[in-house]
Each structure stands twice: as structure tokens, then as C-alpha cells.
Image (cartoon, rainbow, N blue to C red):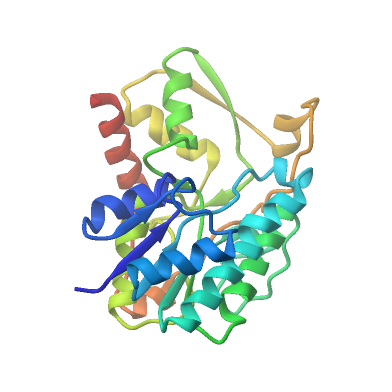
Amino acid sequence: MTRVLVTGGNGQVGRAFAKLIPAAVVLDRRALDIADTGAVYRAFEEHRPEVVYNTAAYTAVDRAEAEPEQARLINVDAVVNLANAARDNDCLLVQYSSDYVFRGDAGPYTELDRTLPASVYGRTKLQSEVAARASGNRYLIIRTSWVFGDGHNFVKSIVGAAARHPELTVVDDQRGRPTYAPDLAEGSAALVAAGCSGVYNLSGGGEPGTWADVAEAAIQAAGLTARVRRVTTAQYYAGKQGPVAPRPANSELDCSKAGEAGVNLRPWRAAVAEYVKELTQS
């Protein structure tokens, strides 16, 4: 059996891997701070992984505008540690990246399209890709989008808010495909099993939608009656305090390369329905 190490074990994708691969060593930040070079090498020595899924990341998109050093520490410097250790231990590093590496004014984006991130978060995720392959190690970079699963996420927030309010205001001019964390974990493992390397897009299937579409799908799946008021990004953030990062208007990823490897994630609407069912029954 392949020895697997998962970092960022407390996150949505990390938790999904813990369920998908029970034999995996899944470490949260308390058990392994990947920004600590010595700790990373000790973890590799102790667990001797053959595959590392790095699901740890700084994902506070707006806060990153005010904390670029912290975002870089987790999204870039820590990945350098993992890439160096992976190289020195002949280990495959699976690094997760984001739709935010693109400007968001075109799409659907293929793996070969020009990257031009508009935010601090997007720039650090692009730099994480460079870090993942700079050490000459074996790597698989997976770009994904709009992840939801076990933990704090948009779908869960919408269902909770819809249970309390008759109307919700949701952005309707950002377009993409949500990705269910368990599906992402399963698809990632399938790409590894297929011997894939390099850069792959992997997001939920089906027709793309806006955040307002996702909200309506979640509300319907929960059997609630709250109405969605569709607004522009500019309207939504008008008057809000603190930094606001630019968002890609089009986050649609072309996942045909993964499809050619036999990996396709289910339509996002079906995944949202399953997740909401689990939420409301728990």
C-alpha cells in the first residue's frame, strides 16, 4: 500500500482525505507546521511518505491583501519546504492551486492559458506552483475552484442564513463551478493512481453558475424558502470595511485534460444536494 501523508488535516480537503484514505497519516498544523523546515524533514523521516497531498493553505482572500507576508509564508515558503523534502525523499508532492491564478476576464481556462492573478492570494497560489516544481522533485499541481465540504464554506453559510432570513443578497457576476471536497480528494487520488504529473485543472462538473445560482441550489436542496437577491460584486462590497481582494469574474476551469486521464468530477449541483442533505440530517 502506498504510504500517504496529508498536510492541513483540519481543512475541508484534508478531512476528506482522512475519510477517503483511512491508512493515510493526516496532520493538522498543530502536528506539523509546514513553515518549519526542520519539522517537515522530521515528518518525512518518521512517516516515509511516497505521496504527500498538501491541503494546507492560507485561504483568507480579503485578509491576504493586508497580510501578504503571512499568505506568502504558508502558500509559498512552506511549499518550498515540502518540495525540498519531497525531492530528498523521492516522494510525489501534490500541491493544490486555485482559479485565482487567472485574471478572470476570459475562460474557460486550460492549463496552458496565461496566468495573471489580480490579488495577493492569487499571486501566492501561483508562486506556490513555482515552489512546488522548483526543487526538481516529482510534482502534481491541481488547480481547483470554489471548494466546499466539512468545515466553514459558502454552501453551509447560505443554508444557515436561509434558515434565519427570508431574503439573502448574493453576488451574481462571478461565474465558476463549485467543487465538493470529497470529490476533489477522490479525483486527486485517481490522477495520482493514473501516474499523472504536471498541472491539471480539477473542479466540479456540469454547467458553470454564479454564486447566486449556487445559493439557490443549496436553499432548494435544504427545502427552505428564502429568496436570493442577485447583485453585482461592486454592489455587494459597497461600504464594507477592510480590504477587499479583486475576484475573477470567470473562474471556469477547463478540466478536459483530467477527463482524458479518466478523471471527471460529478456535476456540482448533485454534489451540493448531497452535501446539504448531510448538513440538514446531522
| Quadrant that contains the N terminus | bottom left
Residue at position x 43%, y 82% from top? 197
| Quadrant that contains the C terminus | top left
Which residue ends up furthest to the left in the rendered image?
1
Q: Give the left or right position of residue 30, taking residue 24 as reference.
A: right
Q: Quadrant of residue 89?
A: bottom left
* Nearer to the camera, 161 or 151: 151
Residue 245: horizontal and vertical position, in percent? 74, 45
* Nearer to the camera, 71 or 169: 71
Vertically, is 144 above or below 92? above
Is residue 219 in view? yes
* Nearer to the camera, 73 or 224: 73
Residue at position x 48%, y 39% from top? 213
Vertically, is 199 above or below 62? below
Residue 174: horizontal and vertical position, in percent? 62, 47
Is residue 143 in view? no
Residue 145: horizontal and vertical position, in percent? 51, 55
Vertically, is 110 above or below 224? below
* Nearer to the camera, 267 or 26: 26
Vertically, is 256 above or below 248? below
Residue 203: horizontal and vertical position, in percent? 44, 60
Residue at position x 57%, y 69% from top? 81
Residue at position x 35%, y 47% from top? 15
